[in-house]
Amino acid sequence: MLSEESLVFLEKLRENNHKDWFSQHRKDYELYRKELLTAAEYILKALKTNDHELANTKPSQCLFRINRDIRFSADKRPYKTHVSLGFAPDGRKGDLAGYYVHFDLEESFVGGGVYMPPAEVLKKIRNDIDLYWDEFSDILNNPAFKAIYSDLDFEEMWTLTRPPKGYEENNPAIKYLKLKSFTVTHPLNYSQLSDSETLPMLIEHLLPLKDFVHFLNRAICSDDEPNVILKPFYKI
């Protein structure tokens, strides 16, 4: 997926995460970005054959800026040293659920969904899970999906201890209605960044997400409040 030169660039950037070093190695960054763009184009082309909602998404929209937003962070390192790609109908900066790839020394994974939506949208997603529980259950139990993603991500900080307002504990979907974030992930190894088989593998892991992503986006797009600003499906 990435050349040895790009991996060395990331390694050195971790050790020299400041503007002067980055400016001196601008050409190395340009090679790294070019390789990421090629990877995004390869993955997006395969996803488009399966997901018509990505028809207008461009490869450049699937890349993230390498600059970190440090305005409100105690960590003042200016550059990201993880590798990430996001594929959604309106690009990686958009408001809809989508597909995500993440490589970092501490954590690497492939997956998708919508990450920590605001209250108005959370209500919409819960409503659709409740109304269309049979459909949602079928999506999660689809053999192709189940073979890679055993279930949604259930982190304590993303899960209510009690049923949300309007729902009872005996609701068959209550496990999912308690969620505040709707994502699925499959772990990867950072070493796979340099593997020639990684791109085909990522596609195999992303394609089964289509129905899950579409279910979430149907709920999101049914919202008639045009000024709702969603958090993206990926983790920054």
Image (cartoon, rainbow, N blue to C red):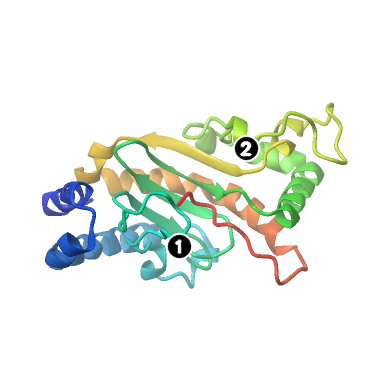
**According to the image, label 2 marks what residue?**
158
Residue drawn where x is 80% and y is 33% of the image: 163
Residue 145 on image: x %, y %: 53, 38
Q: In the image, is 132 to the left or to the right of 95?
A: right
103 over 173 or under it: above or below: below
In front here: 104 or 22? Answer: 22
Q: Quadrant of residue 40?
A: bottom left
Residue drawn where x is 46% and y is 34% of the image: 148
Residue drawn where x is 40% and y is 34% of the image: 187
81 over 53 or under it: above or below: above
Residue 34 on image: x %, y %: 22, 65
Determine the secondary structure under disc 1: helix
Identity, as a three-letter code, of the amino acid under mark 2: Trp
Q: In the image, is 196 to the left or to the right of 134?
A: left
Residue 3 on image: x %, y %: 15, 52
Identity, as a three-letter code, of the amino acid under mark 1: Lys
62 over 106 or under it: above or below: below
Determine the secondary structure under disc 2: helix
Q: Is residue 49 visible?
A: no
25 over 110 or under it: above or below: below
Q: Earlier in the sequence, mark 1 or mark 2?
A: 1
Q: Is residue 140 visible?
A: yes
Disc 1 to disc 2: CB gap under 8 Å: no
Label 1 vs label 2: CA separation? 31 Å
* Number of numbered discs visible in the structure rendering: 2
Label at residue 214: none
Residue 8 on image: x %, y %: 13, 49
Q: In the image, is 78 to the left or to the right of 28?
A: right
Q: Quadrant of residue 190?
A: top left
In front here: 132 or 167? Answer: 167
Given the current orientation, which residue lies at the most extreme front position?
74
**According to the image, label 1 marks what residue?**
48
